Image: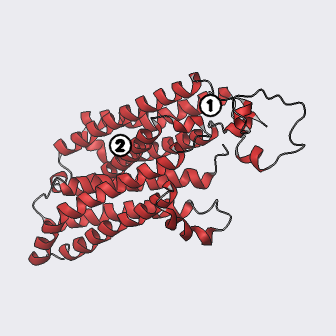
Amino acid sequence: MHPAFSVILFTTLSGAGYGLLAWLGALLASSRLASLHALSDDVTVTATLMLIVLALGLVLAAVGLLASTFHLGKPLRAWRAFSQWRTSWLSREGVLALATFVPALALAALALLAARGDAADAARLAAWVPWLGGALSVLALLTVACTAMIYASLPPIPAWRHRLVVPVYLGFALLTGWALLAAVLPTTGTPTPALRLLAVALAILALAVAAMKLRYWRAIDSTPLTVTRADAVGLPGRELSVFERPHTEDNYLTREMGYVLARKHARKLRLIAVLAFAAVPLLLALLVWLWPGAAWVAFPLAAAAALLGALVERWLFFAQARHLVTLYY
């Protein structure tokens, strides 16, 4: 498949944004966000931290969603996708993506009020945070799952039908989201035990995503296509041979569905992706564990590396996917 940069940018940035919102929601629902900064008993500091993380997550999600319209022939008609939520994963993703903004903006409004230091506003924030945080986390993860299902639900592309496609999408969202959260927290004076906890979680996520992605790559490399040229043109169970090329020049199908990536280039790009989204964050997490004072540099570098690795991985996800129509062409 042709790797459209707008779709790559969309799935990477929105995944990171919703992953960050999912982690924030989970921490708020479990009342653990305050313990990750130095002044855990200061509601104003916690509210300010909430605003920073919410702003970053919402900006990434919004930029990603806007990027998804760039490859459309008629971007102004994108709103029509919301009407098909009963049958379309794309429509469900759009509905959930916007629904996630509701608890996020509600939390932002409460945090703005609490940041002024008023006791009544602080009490209101404490009462609503667990419920809104839980809703935010669930909706964000469901949005990412729907994004993955857009591709996992397409039978003509066997590589996308693999059972690891959805877990890998969720894994990258959680990895990049946690890396971004870890990059923000040291600015609030996070205590050493919390920094080490952030580092351990980052290392575990990087290893888990790498394991899933390597297993996925092995599977698509070793599994032959289970269909024939006859299946590709809608004549299953019959013999079909081509005696003449079906086209004299490139057309839409050969440009969009027949992207060819040399195996040697794919190996290099896979190595770059794994080094960026797994090896570099793992080494930087180890550095923070051994020397917590380096967190203010190590965590932002880990987040940048994870996002870069996710971009390369997502490019490969599209470039290496073979559409069955290429059996005919």
Name the side, left or right, on which 146 lies relative to 134: right
Q: Residue at image x 39%, y 41%?
A: 171
Q: Percent x, y for residue 124?
A: 14, 73
- Is there a contact, CB below 8 Å, between mark 2 and mark 1? no
Please tell me whether residue 61 is drawn above or below residue 288 in the rendered image.
Answer: below
Name the side, left or right, on which 105 lies relative to 223: left
Which element is circle 1 on?
helix
Q: Percent x, y for residue 137?
A: 29, 55
Q: Which residue is mark 1?
A: 266
236 or 206: nearer the viewer: 236
Quadrant location of the N terminus?
top right
Can residue 130 be seen here?
A: yes
Quadrant location of the C terminus?
top right
Q: Which residue is mark 2?
A: 298
Q: Percent x, y for residue 65?
A: 50, 62
Identify the colour scheme used: secondary structure
Q: Residue at image x 42%, y 43%?
A: 172
How many numbered marks appear?
2
Please tell me whether residue 33 is drawn above or below residue 224 in the rendered image.
Answer: below
Within the image, what quadrant is residue 70 found in?
A: bottom right
Q: Percent x, y for residue 159?
A: 57, 35
Three-letter code, disc 2: Ala
95 or 233: nearer the viewer: 233
Measure the alpha-carbon separation of dots 2 and 1. 29 Å
Can residue 118 be seen here?
A: no
Please tell me whether residue 10 is drawn above or below residue 237 in the rendered image.
Answer: below
Please tell me whether residue 283 is drawn above or below residue 169 in the rendered image.
Answer: above
Q: Residue at image x 31%, y 54%?
A: 22
Q: Residue at image x 34%, y 45%?
A: 299
Three-letter code, disc 1: Ala
Q: Which mark is residue 278?
A: none
Which element is circle 2 on?
helix
